[in-house]
Image (cartoon, rainbow, N blue to C red):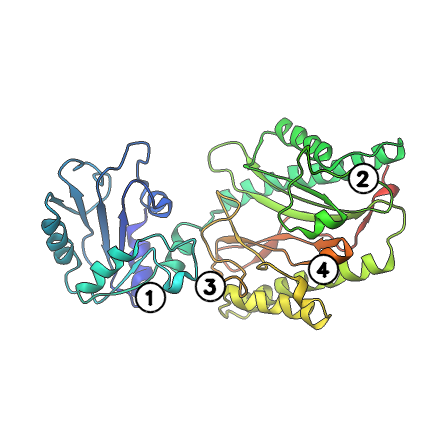
Amino acid sequence: MDLHAIQSALKEAGIDGWLFYDFHNRDAIAARILNMDTSRFASRRWFYFIPAEGEPQKLVHRIEPWRCDHLPGEKHVYLPWKQLQDSLRGMLGDAKKIAMQYSPDNNIPYVSIVDAGTVELIRGFGVEVVSSGDLVGRFEAHLSMEDWEQHKEAGRILQKVKDETFREVARRIKAGESPREVEIQNFMHDLMRANGMHWEDGPIVAINEHAADPHFEPTEENSFGMKEGDLLLIDLWAKKDEPGGIYYDVTWMGYIGTEIPERIRDIFNIVRDARDAGLKMVQERFAAGKPVAGWEVDDAVRKVIADAGYGEYFVHRTGHNIGLEVHGNGGHIDNLETRDDRLILPGTCFSIEPGIYMEHEKLGFRSEIDVFVTDEGQVDVFGAVQTDVIPILTLG
């Protein structure tokens, strides 16, 4: 924890302090920022208050007085509930506005962790509670250049897995086989394991109407066999299976044939252009030194698809934060599922992945890139970026 940096950020934001609170290790954000030991059972409530100025304050239960001993600041110990409330009120001092892991109207569920009762308790002290969303983005979702290298190493491997997968589909089809989606997924699993990767689920391997399901995952029971003339979507995400691994997450499209049908090409190009419009907005804003929020990028991407007449078929947010988890806690590219007004911050990574999903036509399209903004405001995308649907049967 960088106390000086947090206090500087609080002053910059006009917030009097940041109050961390947890019970039963529910707040993974607090655990990561404060380096809490979550291997031990947390059976009692604890609080840690970082004021914009002055010494931090910690409040722990008499049964677990060691809970925050690794953190700087004055320690207060409570036993009865009234003592907890009185001590907490005293810790906050003259603070009038504090940040907590809270989101108005639960707009950003990733940071909406503190329960309503605790927020009510703090408000009862005459203190305004505001969202810690941008603070979380700065101190929990921030990636160092070493993290960026981890992301790129994962990207090198997954780009190779993607290439080998399309070649494997081509090989099997040319051999007269009809590989099922789950078989190709297993092929990808083997490559990923052989390269020391870690992932929780996926990857997505989907043809035709299955590609129209944004979260389709093949199983032995639901998998289709592939054949010439099928549209193929693969979405793969993983990180190096080692401490500090950062996820890489991309989606590519292929067509099992030697020539791409005009309609397939045209729809993919809309998705591609929408993706690129989002990237362009981020690049232009940072180049000009102007802020940009996730909802604004979502709007720019969504407009391209809506203007082309496919707006109703773009049914998810444009992108998500990426870090130690594939869906991290930083700002998302979203003005559909939520209005994510968090800023895109230097040192963060996120996906841009628009899609068009038409179940009635048994077609689904998505293209995904990962965008990283350095601390200096340089906007980078690592790895190959898809510009055209891959004609799979041209691959050797």
**Res 61 → quadrant:** top left
Question: In the image, what residue type sits under mark 1?
Answer: Glu
Q: CA distance from mark 3 to mark 1?
A: 14 Å
SS label for mark 2: loop
- Could one spot residue 41 in this view of the protein? yes
For the C terminus, the image quarter is top right
For disc 1, the marked residue is 12
SS label for mark 3: loop
For disc 3, the marked residue is 343
SS label for mark 4: helix
Q: Residues within 10 Å of mark 1 (few under 14, many from 20)?
A: few
| Lower position in the chain sequence, tag 1 or tag 2 | 1
Question: In the image, what residue type sits under mark 3?
Answer: Leu
For disc 4, the marked residue is 272
| Lower position in the chain sequence, tag 4 or tag 3 | 4
Q: Residues within 10 Å of mark 3 (few under 14, many from 20)?
A: many
| Lower position in the chain sequence, tag 4 or tag 1 | 1
| Lower position in the chain sequence, tag 3 or tag 1 | 1
| Lower position in the chain sequence, tag 3 or tag 2 | 2
Name the front one of labels 3 and 1: 3
Percent from the top left, x then y, of residue 269?
76, 61
